[in-house]
Amino acid sequence: MMCMGAAMSFYIGGIYYALESPIDGATCFATQFWQNNQKEIPSYGLPKIHGGLLRDQGKDILREYLELVPTGPLVQFSKTLIKL
């Protein structure tokens, strides 16, 4: 959510990402929330959001990470994203 808020505060035109993150991602929440509450802060607007860009390459990067760091707090999180 902080990244989305920062993008909105600096009037970033678009956000591009490889993998959605259902655990901590903000794009779905922000889009739904903003559609219902945009009148609260009319000068703000959501950036255009483009997901799935280079999805397979993003998964490959996570697989490489798991080879380098087989244990730790981000291992299960990375495995979850790879399964998407």
Image (spheres, rainbow, N blue to C red):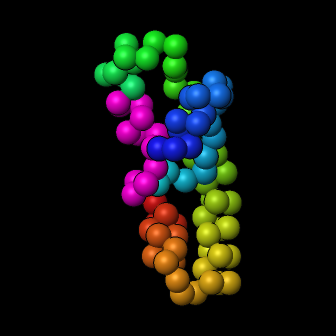
Tell me: 44 left or right of 55. Answer: left
Q: Give the image quarter of residue 56.
A: bottom right
Q: Is residue 68 left or right of residue 71?
A: right
**Residue 23 screen position, x and y as percent:** 39, 57
Q: Residue at x 46, y 12 (%)?
A: 42
Q: Quadrant of residue 57?
A: bottom right
x and y percentages locating residue 15 in the rendered image: 62, 36
Q: Is 5 displayed left or right of 65 in the figure?
A: left
Q: Which residue is depicted at the point 46% across and 49% down?
A: 25
Give percent across and percent down for residue 16: 63, 40
Q: Residue at x 52, y 83 (%)?
A: 72
Q: Nearer the viewer, residue 14 or 45?
A: 45
Number of callouts in the render? Answer: 0
Between 18 and 14, the residue placed more toward the observer is 14
Tell whether position 27 is magenta: yes
What residue span does the magenta drawing correspond to? 22-33
Q: Is residue 10 visible?
A: yes
